[in-house]
Image (cartoon, helix red, strand yellow):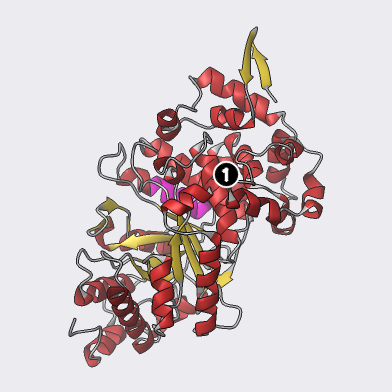
């Protein structure tokens, strides 16, 4: 059905819900590239006004991508809980925004409606929210997950220690991981993006990371971010796989571009559970998303990139993950052109992920050909801390030497701990103090004597590789 509104005697018409959502999206280069964006700020405003007056029930009557041909759409339908939708079923999108912002709407109310929300509803309300609205609501929504550390408790910030190396050299990975640990980074996961995806390298990397973790008794989990099929093969060899990783997107076709489907993800989840490396109820999956992933695979079906991103969150929550993060600026300026668009997208993704019930983190990052810099990343990091983001990713010097993009540095995590008063997971916080890395107030010590002694006494870290 068409949608329309009038501004100063000009009638703006939107042919369907897909068109309305796309035109209402804050400006970004990816939607312009796809040819679905508003022609300018006035049409965007008209779309946002129209969207605000749309009943939430309208999203139950109009599919953006047909479930008959798309398993993600079918999953969204299967997840939907009409009884959870009941408390907000009479609201429009604009009224839903006001309900979310009410002081009396807190953790209990937000948790109760989680499966009464479709990704399209969540994307819609985010499009009519200011940055501070996205922060205010996300800060109220706590999503806690556990393996060896407890991630997502309000007022805390976890970090992924990302010790990538351009040739997957064991000593290089180990040195980088230790560098992060010395700065207090790694309570969410110590996770390596491998330069290759061979089973031999995968097993070597997870074995190396597990040796580091176990010898130093670090209360964290490790991960090699190889393809899910490689992880399954490694698990078959009884490799020490803590978390299974996979990049995912918001349509079946886009996920096929990543070489995965829902059945494959379930197989990997079941395989990881069978290893019994964590507590019985441990969260075992790690998913990565990013605005523009579906568009770059020509698998967006005319849907705007931010709505497609939120559809990916339905895939993630089907597997009760430990970690989910958007690599917000990684895909490039073709999708998020500059610092302003990256900041907005990061806040949107975090808000939408939390509202969908996900343990949401953000890789605060940009590529070197984007119109962005570390000042923009400082801003986004600080805003995300205000929004109670579950975790961020840090690398030495903010420069990933394997993936060739700019992220956060381990020093940025220290800023969050010491200036913004965001301690790490409680188990990891206690370990940092026990190892002499921090004082009782959580500040880094100048001379981490105890950890240095541990390292010097250990024949460690895959030294022959």
224 in relation to 355, above or below: below
Query: Is the N terminus in the top left, top right, bottom left or bottom right quadrant?
Result: top right
Q: Is residue 382 magenta?
A: yes
**Residue where numbered disc 1 is placed:** 134
Q: At x 52% / y 33%, what residue is drawn?
A: 302
Where does the image place residue 430, in percent across and percent down from the top left? Answer: 46, 80
The quadrant of the image that shows the C terminus is: bottom left
Q: How many discs appear?
A: 1
Residue 8 seen in the figure: no
Of residue 368 and residue 158, the one placed in the foreground of this image is 368
Q: Residues within 10 Å of mark 1 (few under 14, many from 20)?
A: many
Residue 64, quarter of the rendered image: top right
Secondary structure under the numbered disc 1 in the rendered image: helix
Q: Position of residue 279 (x, y in %)?
A: 56, 83
State the residue in front, 229 or 318.
229
Q: From this viewpoint, which residue is outermost toward the front?
A: 68
Q: Main secondary structure of the magenta part?
A: helix
351, above or below 285, in the image: above
Residue 419 visible: yes
Residue 459 falls left or right of residue 434: left
Q: Position of residue 57 (x, y in %)?
A: 76, 39
**Picture quadrant where residue 317 is located:** bottom right
Residue at 55 percent across and 31 percent down: it is 22
* Residue at 57%, 70% in the rendered image: 145
Left or right of 289, for residue 351 = right
Nearer-the-camera pick, 413 or 304: 304
Q: Is residue 243 magenta?
A: no
Magenta segment boundaries in residue numbering: 378-386
Instruction: Give the percent coordinates (x, y) of residue 244.
Output: 45, 70
Left/right placement of residue 119 relative to residue 308 reads right
Above/below status of 266 relative to 400: below
């Amino acid at each position: 059905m068409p949608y329309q509104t009038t501004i100063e005697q000009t009638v703006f018409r939107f042919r369907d819900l897909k068109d309305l959502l796309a035109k209402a999206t804050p400006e970004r280069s990816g939607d312009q590239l796809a040819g679905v964006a508003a022609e300018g700020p006035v049409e965007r405003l008209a779309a946002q006004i129209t969207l605000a007056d749309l009943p939430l029930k309208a999203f139950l009557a109009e599919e953006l991508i047909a479930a008959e041909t798309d398993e993600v759409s079918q999953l969204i339908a299967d997840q939907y809980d009409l009884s959870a939708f009941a408390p907000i079923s009479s609201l429009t999108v604009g009224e839903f925004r006001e309900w979310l912002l009410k002081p009396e709407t807190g953790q209990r109310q937000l948790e109760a409606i989680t499966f009464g929300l479709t990704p399209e509803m969540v994307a819609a309300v985010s499009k009519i929210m200011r940055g501070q609205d996205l922060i205010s609501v996300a800060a109220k929504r706590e999503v806690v997950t556990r393996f060896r550390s407890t991630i997502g408790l309000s007022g805390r910030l976890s970090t992924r220690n990302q010790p990538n190396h351009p040739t997957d050299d064991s000593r290089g990975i180990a040195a980088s991981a230790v560098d992060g640990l010395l700065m207090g980074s790694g309570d969410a996961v110590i996770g390596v993006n491998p330069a290759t995806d061979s089973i031999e390298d995968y097993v070597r990397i997870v074995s190396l990371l597990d040796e580091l973790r176990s010898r130093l008794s670090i209360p964290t989990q490790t991960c090699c971010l190889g393809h899910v099929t490689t992880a399954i093969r490694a698990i078959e060899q009884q490799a020490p796989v803590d978390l299974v990783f996979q990049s995912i997107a918001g349509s079946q076709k886009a996920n096929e571009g990543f070489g995965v489907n829902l059945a494959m993800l379930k197989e990997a989840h079941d395989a990881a559970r069978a290893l019994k490396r964590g507590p019985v109820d441990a969260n075992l999956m790690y998913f990565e998303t990013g605005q523009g992933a579906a568009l770059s695979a020509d698998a967006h079906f005319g849907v705007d990139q931010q709505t497609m991103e939120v559809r990916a969150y339905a895939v993630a929550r089907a597997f009760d993950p430990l970690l989910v993060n958007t690599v917000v600026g990684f895909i490039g300026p073709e999708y998020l052109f500059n610092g302003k668009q990256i900041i907005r997208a990061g806040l949107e993704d975090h808000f939408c992920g939390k509202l969908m019930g996900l343990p949401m983190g953000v890789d605060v990052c940009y590529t070197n050909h984007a119109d962005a810099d570390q000042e923009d990343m400082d801003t986004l990091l600080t805003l995300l801390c205000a929004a109670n983001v579950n975790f961020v990713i840090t690398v030495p010097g903010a420069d990933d030497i394997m993936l060739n993009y700019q992220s956060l540095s381990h020093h940025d995590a220290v800023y969050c701990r010491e200036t913004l008063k965001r301690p790490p997971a409680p188990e990891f916080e206690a370990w940092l103090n026990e190892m002499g890395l921090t004082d009782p107030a959580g500040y880094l010590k100048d001379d981490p004597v105890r950890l240095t002694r541990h390292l010097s006494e250990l024949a460690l870290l895959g030294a022959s590789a």
